Image (cartoon, rainbow, N blue to C red):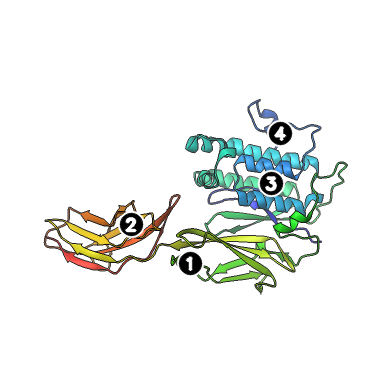
Amino acid sequence: MKRTKILAALSAAAMAVSMAAVPAQAAAASDSTSSAVVMGAASYDIIDVVNAFKDAGFNSLNVNNLRNFLILNDDYFSDSDYADFIDFANEIKDLYFAPLAYSLFYKTPAQLSESERYDVLDNLSNAEKDAIDKRLIKVAEDHYVLVTFDYDANGYTVVYGSMRQGASKKSKSSGSGYSFDDDDEDWGYSKSSKSGSISKASVSLSATKLIYNGSARKPAVAVKLNGKKLVKGRDYTLTFKNNIRPGQATVTVTGKGSYSGSKTVAYYIAPRTLTIRKLSSPAKYKIKAVWNREPVATGYNIQVSANSGFGSVKNYYVKNNNTVTKTISGLTSGRRYFVRVRAYKQISTRKICGKFSAVKKITVK
């Protein structure tokens, strides 16, 4: 069976790393508070590696990708290789994740929520990201792993791996500590030969932002692998999550039949378009806008401009979705202004905005 595929996910725009080895001197230099693994007679397996990466602060997608890669290629790695991978995960934790996790959240990397792990990635400097990229490539080569790079829907770099030519299977006296069982079928892998992994497929959506309508929103999905268009139902299945209310939704493409693996792509659901119910100038230099409430929104964005094309615009925000009025002061008396409003859903640091209302104009007292 051809052994390939996912190594892990790494952010070059943020960071998520896969496996590699740490120099012996790095482990030797670690003091009693370091998380580096002490080399010796201990035996390590896939579960130990996976737990090390999880505790180091890597996000769940990256950890699952690493686990799947190791399961498919377990025969190529020895106990000492796994110890090296654990050391590498701990090195990244100690040098990058742990200081930021404490600085941002007063937590250890293992205590971070999924969204907090991405926040840590986003706070890495470009120099740190570049250094990690170069380190990953080098240590991957040392373990006969070839890495290639792609991007997910959120702009994070995903690293794929395959065994290099010349890689040899290892003899293991005690075994790897992991064997296939029926549960592994749920991960998209089987014991039979496969034509390819969906993880390396190109997945395109008919739209990356849809408008909330109270029902499940599902963009059309097209999947291609090695230039071949795959067929839904025969080659893959689709699983949609969080695709009713405004926010981030996902669709997971899972291989079927001749295809293994899976790939998850994100898209967004935005609040409905609003209507400005009333626009007035209640006093000198002021205007007041009233619009309809959007219950599933976080808040509202009001734009005011003296130009009908909104070439120069001032933005105002209402952060309570129960407040559907805004009085704006400091405007020029006798001047005509154009106003529009839209609802937004706040997801971490991102505002997912709906479409603007129809523009209304008014002359200020």
**Residue 46: percent from the left, percent from the top?**
75, 45
Q: Secondary structure at mark 3?
A: loop
Looking at the picture, which amino acid does disc 1 mark?
A: Ser
Alpha carbons under labels 1 and 4: distance apart? 50 Å
Instruction: Please identify the residue farthest to the top as the structure is shown.
Output: 32
Residue at which label 3 appears: 19
Residues packed near mark 1 inside 10 Å, few (<14), some (14 to 19) or many (20 plus):
few
Alpha carbons under labels 1 and 3: distance apart? 41 Å
| Nearer-N-terminus badge (1/3) | 3
Looking at the picture, which amino acid does disc 4 mark?
A: Val
| Nearer-N-terminus badge (3/2) | 3
**Residue 236: percent from the left, percent from the top?**
67, 68
Alpha carbons under labels 3 and 2: distance apart? 44 Å
- Which residue is at 84% across, 44% downward? 175
Q: Quadrant of residue 344?
A: bottom left
Quick one: 280 or 175, which is closer to the camera?
A: 280
Compared across the picture, whether 226 is left or right of 306 comes to right
**Residue 348: percent from the left, percent from the top?**
45, 50
Quick one: 181 or 162, which is closer to the camera?
A: 181
Position of residue 151 relative to residue 231, above or below, is above
Alpha carbons under labels 2 and 1: distance apart? 22 Å
Quick one: 193 or 143, which is closer to the camera?
A: 193
Between marks 4 and 2 in the image, the one whose residue lies nearer the viewer? 2
Residue at which label 2 appears: 300
